[in-house]
Amino acid sequence: MTQKNYDISISSKTSYIPEQSSPNGMRYVFTYTITITNSGLVAAKLLRRHWVITDANGKVQEVKGDGVIGEQPHIMPGESHQYSSASVLETPVGCMQGSYEMIADDGVEFEAPIPVFNLSMPNALH
């Protein structure tokens, strides 16, 4: 198998934060940690993010902006960048997905898809 020039993989881990949540107030707070790995042959910089956050009622929030948590990480081949952030939903279950807009060191811009991941309060899903 030949290695691609532009190959960014993204993984996620999530946690429910009960001390910041208020189920009676329809406020459910989740943290997520994202690991962005450059498996390609060319270093790349993360320029922009685009998130689509959907709660159990079908309410969709879109978040677009420069970088992630105020950074535009430059990721060398074989290296990873990890960061944590949070999301607030009105339901105990939801999901997130999206993409990162990247620019490789050779000037090629490309999109790195963020696979869908679930946000769920413990015992909310069977």
Image (cartoon, helix red, strand yellow):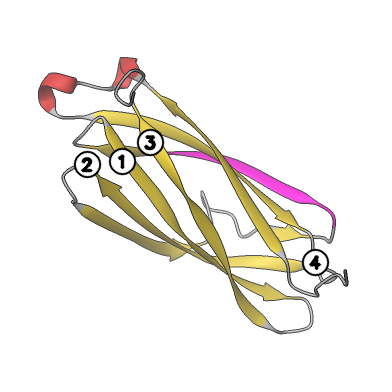
Is tag 3's residue or tag 1's residue first in the polypeptide sequence?
A: 1
Looking at the rendered structure, the secondary structure element under dot 2 is loop
Q: Position of residue 126 (x, y in %)?
A: 34, 23
Position of 34 relative to 112 (above/below)? above
Residue appearing at x 39%, y 49% in the figure: 96
- In percent of width and height, residue 14 lies at 48, 32
Q: Which residues are magenta?
A: 78-86
Q: Nearer the viewer, mark 4 or mark 2?
A: 2
Q: Earlier in the sequence, mark 3 or mark 4?
A: 4
Q: Position of residue 89 (x, y in %)?
A: 25, 38
* Residue 40 image label: 4
Point out the residue furthest to the left here. 24
* Identity, as a three-letter code, of the amino acid under mark 1: Gly
Position of residue 117 in the picture relative to residue 108 (left or right): left
Q: Amino acid at mark 3?
A: Leu
**Residue bearing the label numbered 2:** 56
Side (left or right) of 82 relative to 77: left
Judged by its main secondary structure, the magenta piece is strand
**Residue 67 pos. (x, y %):** 54, 60
Label 3, secondary structure: give it. Answer: strand
Kindly check if marks 1 and 4 are in contact, taking CB atoms under 8 A apart as contact: no
Which of the numbered marks, if any, corresponds to residue 29?
none
| First in sequence: mark 3 vs mark 2 | 2
Q: Quadrant of residue 17?
A: top left
Q: Which element is circle 4 on? A: loop
In the picture, residue 72 is in which quadrant? bottom right
Residue occupied by mark 1: 94
Chain-order first, disc 1 or disc 2: 2
* Disc 3 and disc 1 in contact, CB within 8 angstroms: yes
Question: Which residue position is annotated with label 3?
Answer: 119
